[in-house]
Amino acid sequence: MPLAPLSTQAYGRSGLPKARLVNMYVERTPEGPTESVRRGRPGLVASSTIGAGPIRGVVTHQGFRYVLSGTRMFKATAEIGIVPGLYRIRHAQSDTQLVVVADGVVYLIGATITTIAMPDAELVSDVAYAGGRFIYTMADTGKFRYSDIADAETIGGLNYATAESNPDAIVSVETLGQDVLFFGQSSTEWWGKTSDIAAPFQPYTGRRYDVGSAAQNAAARIDNGLFWVGTAQRDGRTDLKVYRTSSVAEVISTPAIDAFLAQCADISLATAIEVPTEGRSFYVLNIPGVTTVAFDVREKTWSEWSSYGEDTFRVQVADAGTYGDFDTNQLWTVDPDVTMDGTDQMVRICSAYVPTIARQRMSSLHLYGARGEGAVGTTPVVEMRYTDTDDAGWGEWVSTSLGAAGEHPKARWFQLGMMQPPGRIIEFRCSDDVLFAPFGLAVNEMR
């Protein structure tokens, strides 16, 4: 009989079957046996430890890796100074200078750390580099200052402008090619470089979004686009959604992702990174206290990512293939062939929905996967549970063999009772250190 499909992404909406895809993503298989297979996200490989942690920033500059671990900044393995604060730093760099912003203060990072003073002792919320100048946004205002060319430390008293199409404070500043984007609380303005020394940056006429930013650190630049958590006014209420830059602010989140955003107690603390692997990139968004979600830029699908014992993914800063741990002093790399995070299990979950218009018996359930899930000398297992009551009333997880190495596994369960209309939600879970790549399931297949 034809194989029934597995869910293509994490999804949830009232009145409809809930779908889960945890620590997995969809890979298309045009040559069969079904349209797609589910594969585990890249695993984490321990690289080194540094400082006391957590890792608040990783930056590569002039061939050196700078890591902020706790409040201590390291150049390679040598400690060079202190950057106070608790949260992820903001940074920008030219060919010769590296600038960091933390807790309103600007730091020039080199062999040592020095403080860059602002005119009128203003506090700084963010930094970017464009047109040969560093751009500094002033905290809780729509104002920004800019440095002299090739000199991060020289900021003339008249070197300022205001993003003023909307009177909202600037949340963050990002660059995209030669463009500068000022993300406000309720709007986003596009600015460009000019040849006017007195006004080196000017807004583009008519190019703006009526969408702001909810979280300074939730923006990531991927495939010539910016992804961010945006705020917009809809029918008198504030909506949180994930957007991508285009001719308009393009919504890429689903109702399930929007629901996760709405559950966050303080969305301003959300963070995002890019995780590239095997020719694709993921926009990985950590929603504090809720979950981490990952958007597959190529397939335009969402999944959930988590680390063992945590609701969220343990990485929240990244640069040039180095990933920093949000809780410890650990630095990581990622490997698509690794199925663990260091020594911790990676719990992978996918789901399926089997509809029915009448009560009928589920005598058997067979899960099919790609060749080689098993491992020599081990007895890996996959677990299954189901519910007929729309994401409630789950039964216990029931395990069965995943199969031996080199074989096409066919995990089987029998005598699963009567299915009730409108259908049955089924989840599959694997935590063993083996490849888990299911592509379909068969219901009531003959033995």
Image (cartoon, helix red, strand yellow):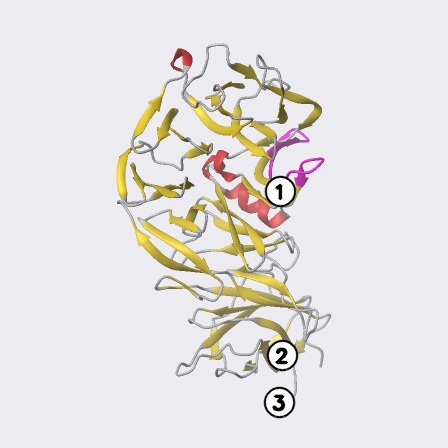
Amino acid type, residue under disc 1 in the picture: Asn
Q: Main secondary structure of the magenta part?
A: strand
Q: Earlier in the sequence, mark 2 or mark 1?
A: 1
Decide whether residue 240 is among the magenta residues.
yes
User: Which residue is painted at 42% across and 82% down in the image?
Assistant: 376
User: Which residue is painted at 63% across and 20% down in the image?
Assistant: 194
* Residue at numbered disc 1: 224
Q: Quadrant of residue 76?
A: top left
* Residue at numbered disc 2: 362
Q: Quadrant of residue 53?
A: top left
Question: What residue span does the magenta drawing correspond to?
Answer: 231-250
Q: Toward the viewer: 421 or 178?
A: 178
Q: Is residue 424 visible?
A: no
Left-right relation of 321 to 86: right
Q: Toward the viewer: 277 or 387?
A: 277
Q: Residues within 10 Å of mark 3 (few under 14, many from 20)?
A: few
- Residue 318: image x %, image y %? 44, 46
For mark 1, give the secondary structure.
loop
For mark 2, give the secondary structure.
loop
For mark 3, give the secondary structure.
loop
- Residue 56: image x %, image y %? 37, 40
